[in-house]
Image (cartoon, rainbow, N blue to C red):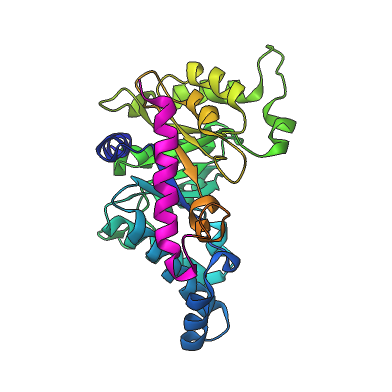
Amino acid sequence: MFIDLLIDAIKEKDNPTVVGLDPKLDYIPQFIKEKSFKEYGTNLKGAAEAILTFNKGLIDAIYDIAPAVKPQLAYYEMYGLEGLEAFHKTVKYAKEKGLVVIADGKRNDIGSTAESYSAGFLGEIKITEDISQPVFDVDALTVNPYLGSDGIKPFIEDCKKYKKGIFVLVKTSNKSSGQLQDLLTHQGTSIYEVVADLVEEWGKCLRGKYGYSSVGAVVGATYPNQAKILRKAMKHAYILVPGYGAQGGTARDVAHSFDGEGLGAIVNASRSIMCAYQSEDWKNSYDEKQYADAARAEAIRMRNDINSVIKV
């Protein structure tokens, strides 16, 4: 199942991190853009091809040290059909390199609409009575729980059938998350704690060999105190931790999402790795044509930083 695939990859590479592939044209070196625009035109096609080239360079640089990548769908969808093709090709290339792929789409709906979202990302689309075909075929997808259980069930069913995973939004890393997630219920518990209890319940049927479930949770690095509470509340949920690096989360912040054995969480960084060649830390060592080398150096630094606080 998905969660065992993910933990095996984390243990094999001794690296509890995931590289976010959230490309914007501003992040992409000029030499890549110039080549793509010359070949495909200064248009959506040229932009999408530049993104794909950029992503492949990043994947080539980190696939042997990182267990997973997390492309954020918004950064592809904004380029229309060409952008979605770049997303699809990025997923395929990453999987060919042996990486676990988590699509960050925060999808949710009810009934047949939720089933359709799930089929497109986790399952297969029925073409005829005898023929079904996967579409994006990612390993896991982020989902929004705020329509309740009937908005999550279709995803769980496909996780069972196709050995995939989901990460449910519990406590997100953005500043205004508390406007809803921190509200107290009539029982005196916060909404994020209620969602955490649901995640534990939803994941009972998908626990793997390490005791964790393929129904995981998203808990931001920018809220370490809440992470302490949620790690105890969700004993079987693997936690996807955004907010490290560019958003201000530190290794000590993310440490609260791990268990006593250094498992239980995988930490995401996007801009700090993708744009490492532009950063104060690395720009004197790498130029834009060495963007992938800079990304690798930052990915290694991040791995070592986090391992230094979770190793027992």
| Residue 82: in magenta span | no
Percent position of residue 148, x then y:
57, 32
The quadrant holding residue 290 is bottom left
| 293 is higher (above) or lower (below) than 50 | above
Q: In the displayed image of the protein, which residue is found farthest to the front? A: 284
Magenta extent: 285-312
Judge whether residue 102 can be spotted in this image. Answer: no
Along the line of sight, which residue is nearer the eye, 280 or 148?
280
Residue at 71% from the left image edge and 37% from the top image edge: 175
Along the line of sight, which residue is nearer the eye, 232 or 16?
16
Judged left or right of residue 9, residue 121 is right
The quadrant holding residue 53 is bottom left
Along the line of sight, which residue is nearer the eye, 230 or 311?
311
Judge whether residue 42 can be spotted in this image. Answer: yes
Q: In the displayed image of the protein, which residue is found farthest to the top? A: 187
| 151 is higher (above) or lower (below) than 46 | above
Residue at 27% from the left image edge and 52% from the top image edge: 98
Instruction: Count how many numbered circles sit on residues in the image.
Output: 0
Percent position of residue 77, x then y:
55, 63
Magenta residues: mostly which secondary structure?
helix
Residue at 50% from the left image edge and 23% from the top image edge: 256
| 134 is higher (above) or lower (below) than 256 | below
The quadrant holding residue 292 is bottom left
Along the line of sight, which residue is nearer the eye, 124 or 129?
124
Give the quarter of the figure containing the N terminus.
top left
| Residue 291: in magenta span | yes
Percent position of residue 57, x then y:
38, 65
